[in-house]
Amino acid sequence: LRYRAARVPYFGCSDSPAVVTVSTEAPDTQLPKWSPDPAGTVTLPIPTPGYLAALDDHFALWSSGTPARRSWLRTPLASYRDPANSRRASAPDAPCVWLRFARPIAGRRLVDVAELTRAAVLEHAERLVGGRDNIPEVLHGHLSGRGEDRHSVRWLPLPNSGGPHGDARLFGVCIWMPWGTTSDVIEIVRASAASVHELIRPRAYGIEVTMFDGTIRPWASNPGRWSRESATWTSVSPVLHEHHHKRDLSLDDLSRWCRYAGLPKPISFFQSPVPLLPGSVVLQPNELGHSGRFRGPKSYLEVTFEAPVRGPVALGRGRGFGLGLMAPTSGGDVA
């Protein structure tokens, strides 16, 4: 075995030389475990059904003299949780349902897509629960009573933003449910969302919709893009101010906004009238929802918390419809 091990030049797909030895005793330390996690920050190649047959077909082409490069064969990838991260990343603080679009749509449709998704899910939920009056209030958003700790479902369109190829186009929707949402409500939302196969705005657009299937791409609609923990978050859609102030925005004002959104108190922030990340959504006043309900001052913000915060994060007025959506950032760069 030692002789055969010494003859191993490389390991896996690595280009670096390998040194392989044989031990007769078990290692003293436990080997790290790479656990599948849709919100994981590490991508690894994986085998999928039919992949071996595809490799055989590719090899047959190459053997017959037909040009066939390995790079032409798509390698399936999956997200994994970094074993160096001692905290479990697979259990987000708030339950979410993730939808993907068959084709991207212009970012200026952000609020319209959120409203259309809400209407479609509520229509299926009404059939599922046997009537409009039986829809959980956390889903339709008309909450009884008052309280800053009360939140309803948020409809968050997901733009391709933050990276070098950011173009602000929408690739999917995250249906965010508040912390503590009961399992029966989660199942109602999940089943209703799974029944939505198309979003149609007559004489404007129509897009096919599917549930997130675990594949990495497109990254803009991957839960890992929006769900990871980060101490710094930067808005990729404009943050509508909660209140009208003639003075400049203060840290106390922002702390109040964060409290409204169920977030901890921030320790610092940066405010800008223009986007801070490439591919951020820019909206005109007539694109901020029907009846002008989301009019008012707006900004792009970079917000830093004392400890990492789990996403998705949305801040400001209109956060239930994709406004104020934040991307996890570190040192000003999207991770």
Image: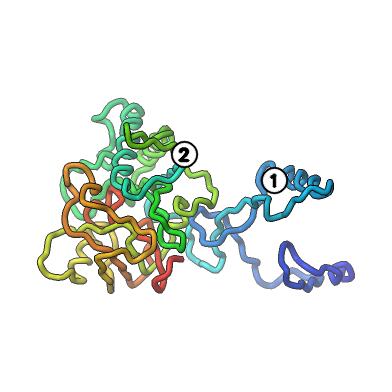
Which is more toward the observer, 242 or 284?
Answer: 284
Q: Position of residue 237 (x, y in %)?
A: 31, 57
Query: Mark 1 belongs to which amino acid?
Result: Tyr
Q: Position of residue 326 (x, y in %)?
A: 34, 60
222 left or right of 109?
Answer: right
Q: Which residue is mark 1?
A: 51
Quadrant holding the N terminus:
bottom right
Q: Position of residue 221 (x, y in %)?
A: 45, 50
Q: Which residue is mark 2?
A: 210
Local secondary structure at mark 1 = helix
Q: CA distance from mark 1 to mark 2?
A: 23 Å
185 left or right of 288?
Answer: right
**Quarter of the figure with residue 274:** bottom left
Of label 1 and label 2, which has the lower sequence position?
A: 1
Query: Mark 2 belongs to which amino acid?
Result: Thr
183 left or right of 50?
Answer: left
Residue at 10% in and 66% down: 246
